[in-house]
Image (cartoon, rainbow, N blue to C red):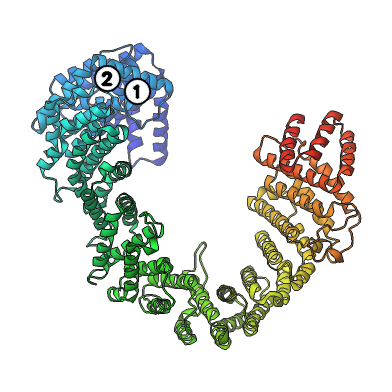
Amino acid sequence: MESQLQQAVEIALSGTSDPHLKQQAMAYCEEVKSSAEGYAAAVGILSQPEAPMPLQFFVYQVLESHLEQLDAAALLKLYHTLRAHLAQRLELASEDPAYLKNKLASLFADLFLKLYLQSYPQFLSDWLEVYATGKPRAVDYYTRTLLAIHTEIGDKFISRSRPNQELIGAVKDQIRTMDMDRLVASWHEILQGGPDRWSDDIIVNTLDLVGSYVSWMEISLFVKPEVVTTIFGYLRVHSARNQCCVCVSEIVAKKMKPTAKLELVAMLDLTTTLNSIGVDDNQDVTFMENLARLINQMGLELVGCIDTSPDLIDQVQPHLYKMWPLALFLLGHEYDDVTQQVFPFIQAFLVSAKKQPALQDRQLLSELLNKVVLKMKYDDDDDGDSDDDGLFHEVRKRLKTFQDSIAMISPDLYIEALPIVINESLFASHDDWRKAELGLYQLTNYGDSLRTNGLGLATVTESPAYFTYREFMVRLIHSDVIVQLRHPKVQLAFFDIVVKHFAFLHPSPKERPGLITRVLEIFMSDVAVFSGDSKVRLRAWYCFYRFLKTTKPTGVTASFVEELTVKLSPLLKIEARPLEENEVNSELSGQLYLLESVALLAALLGSHQESEKVALLNHILSPLFADLEAAVTRGDDLAMLQAQDDIVAIGTVAKGYDDGENEAPESVIAKFGDAASAITITLERMPKHQGVRNAARMTFSRLLPILRGQITAPLSKLVAVIVGAPDLELLELADFLSFLGQLSHAFKKNPELYSLLNNVLSPVFAKVLSMAKTSDDDALIADVHRDKHTLKRSLISLLSGLVLNHQASLLVSESNKQQFPVVLDALLEWARDVAGDGNTAKMAVTQLANLVQIFGGAGGALDDKLDPGAASVPPLDGIDQFLTERVTSLSFEVPFSASFNADDAQHRLVAQEIAFLLKSMYDKRGDDYLGYLRNYLATMGLPSEYTDDLCVNLAKSDVKGFKKYFVTFVRQLK
């Protein structure tokens, strides 16, 4: 079997084997791992040290897979067999590869955990004998095996069961008692031997052993002067210094009391050692990273001493101040990977300094702030063209938290230092975009600190700091730094700061027009809106819009706006193009911002400039009308996309104008009326294009505030097109219902819109109920099932809006009263579907309660004095009795159905709404309803004591109390 096994391993590992044969070989190997014969064969191969290495590795895997099945005697036998096998391997002429050494070491570690505590406590003594041979290859296996043992018993990142934790605790206790002194002594001896005697692997592994075991061994064994001196010596050994840093970090991180920690830090005197080896920029980056981690750990331990024992602050400070020069040097390192390693210490120090005035040393904070600010600057070799600067911004974000903390600790220092940085970076010279970008970034930070008053100023806008900031902003706006440097980073930073902080300047009425005009001039230049850099250009379009929207410059002249509009005209040409799935048309989005901006400027012109307003609107709308006409004529797919984009653009113009003027003059209304007519014609010619329908719906919602009652005719056409669309989708109809709800709310007192809704509700209701019907296939198509419930909830929301906006008379008007019972039946049906969609059921129950409150009284008359149509609709015969019967049966059949679970949160909410429904019914009918309810419950077989209790609570409890009672009532009887 051994030769067969060797052949199978060779085939399985071969890159040229026949695939079918290779699959068979792999299956055979897996079978061997789980069979007793395979285990026996593997043990037999151990006596063949010359066996191929891949086979040896597989043998170790086979043995490993059988360990859980072996009893103590078999485990001990295997251990001795492996020891003999190791002795043979150590005599071979060639050295084992690392992967084979590590696998054998791992196997020994597994055996250690199973044998050491009870069966074979001399396990580690055996390995100390291996070490005592002094043979390099034996010592190599010794260090690897002990590292593997640490993985089993000391690795903090491995999750372990409670029994396993208890076992490991007992193992550690026995090691401390029996073997700890000898193990540590052997490691010291190895390190004393140095690189002249031992290989790099042995030295590095031994340092790893010290760092790994120190966390749970006696610290005094490791921090003897001779041991520390030996370990520190490896900071000068290139091949071992990285692991030495890790080792010392683990020693420093050893858990102990603050006083003992301070004694440890003093004894190590790490900063003296590091200063003696010459830490500078010439060291390789990997070493500097590890060194930074070491300094960070030391700093965290010292700050931890202060946080735990504040009375030790005087003893801790000398160690901190001795360490700070190294920490600051590492913070300012050119590589961010090094810099970030000391971030946790700096953060912890600043948090502690906020609470401990003794740590608020101005000179130290000044040096730290200086390093933080300089590190925020782009590197000299960075051209700023890369889009992949996420790491830089992440580092800068962390640095800003340090800067903000320093500002809170020492506001005077911050107020003194930041203006110097800003002035030198922005205004001293214009020869380096990196300096200017840093200046803009810090000016933004300075403004943020003032706006949020993170500096604790008594009155921000009357403080010297604010006037300094304001002076900088005014100088920036009037300067030509953005024009001279012409770098995207500077341009983008300028756009953001003027949009974000302009309003905070609080310019005087005399000063404001000049500043706004200057900003607009910059935006309208080739460094912004007309930039050749697409990223800058598109961002400028958005920021231009945001600036106008936030400032709403009323002092700008008509000639200026006209000149601006003419200049923008080439950018406003909408050209549709097909988009890939999930692709966003950034160019179109930017153009919409420009169109909205021009419309806003037009609206902001004075009321005496009505003709100028119309001329400006005509300038931007006429090309859109022409495009629509051309698209309708062509009728191809691209034409439909063009029509869709043009309609959206018209809606954007309407939105911009409405933001700038509360009530448009008649000539402007007429112009937007032309727009509505153009859209209506497009709808008639392209009724089957969903994108056109959606765009029209969105645009009409934006035209509503301007056109008001004059939009009824176009809206009627929109409703007809949507309801009659053969390709109408569920979500499109749901969105349309939301649009109707918007109409209901915005124009609840407008008779023209009331008339429009009266004419469209019945066909809309019929369409919704038809499309929302559940079919057997719905459950198979998750999207359809979900979208139908969305449509149902949209209809319920529309009904709720009509009731809350005092327009329920629309439901029972002559045009709609035939459809109203059908809608009620749908609500009752959806309210019962708690298992299918609890949220929809809850909404349906709530809406039934709303309807009960206005239709549930005797006689079926609409009870809403604020509804303007209430007087014109006659009582709906039988509606009160219908609601009484159907609501009552619903209220008890649903919560007592087999599928209802009162412990389910969603079902419980439905039960609470049913309680509200019953309470609404009682509020309308009073004792008459209690009589009906008693008879109903009697026919249902409910004992009279339960009925009496329910009726008493229904009559006397408030809504909140009855909801709580009813849920308990349901639970008791289920």
- At 65% across and 39% down in the image, what residue appears? 905
- At 12% across and 27% down in the image, what residue appears? 225
As drawn, 523 above or below 244: below
Q: Position of residue 96 (x, y in %)?
A: 21, 30
The amino acid beneath tag 1 is: Leu
Q: Position of residue 124 (x, y in %)?
A: 24, 17
Whether residue 629 is visible to the viewer of this picture, yes or no, is yes
What is the quadrant of residue 442 in the picture? bottom left
Q: In the structure shown, which secondary structural element does the residue marked by tag 1 occupy?
A: helix
Instruction: Classify mark 2: residues with Cα within 10 Å, few (<14), some (14-19) or many (20+).
Output: some
As drawn, 412 above or below 700: above
The amino acid beneath tag 2 is: Leu
In front: 531, or 103?
531
Q: Residue 545 got which mark?
A: none
Residue at the spot of label 2: 82
Left or right for 660, reference 426: right
- At 69% across and 54% down in the image, what residue appears? 793
The C terminus lies in which quarter of the figure?
top right
Instruction: Classify mark 1: residues with Cα within 10 Å, few (<14), some (14-19) or many (20+).
Output: many
In front: 804, or 761?
804
Q: Position of residue 749 (x, y in %)?
A: 74, 69
What is the quadrant of residue 642 in the picture? bottom right
In front: 369, or 279?
369
Residue at the spot of label 1: 63
Q: In the structure shown, which secondary structural element does the residue marked by tag 2 occupy?
A: helix
What is the quadrant of residue 14 in the picture? top left
Comes first in the chain, label 1 or label 2: 1
Q: Position of residue 98 (x, y in %)?
A: 23, 33
Whether residue 775 is visible to the viewer of this picture, yes or no, is no
- At 15% across and 25% down in the image, what residue appears? 224
Q: Is there CB contact under 8 Å for labels 1 and 2?
A: yes
Numbered circles on residues, count = 2
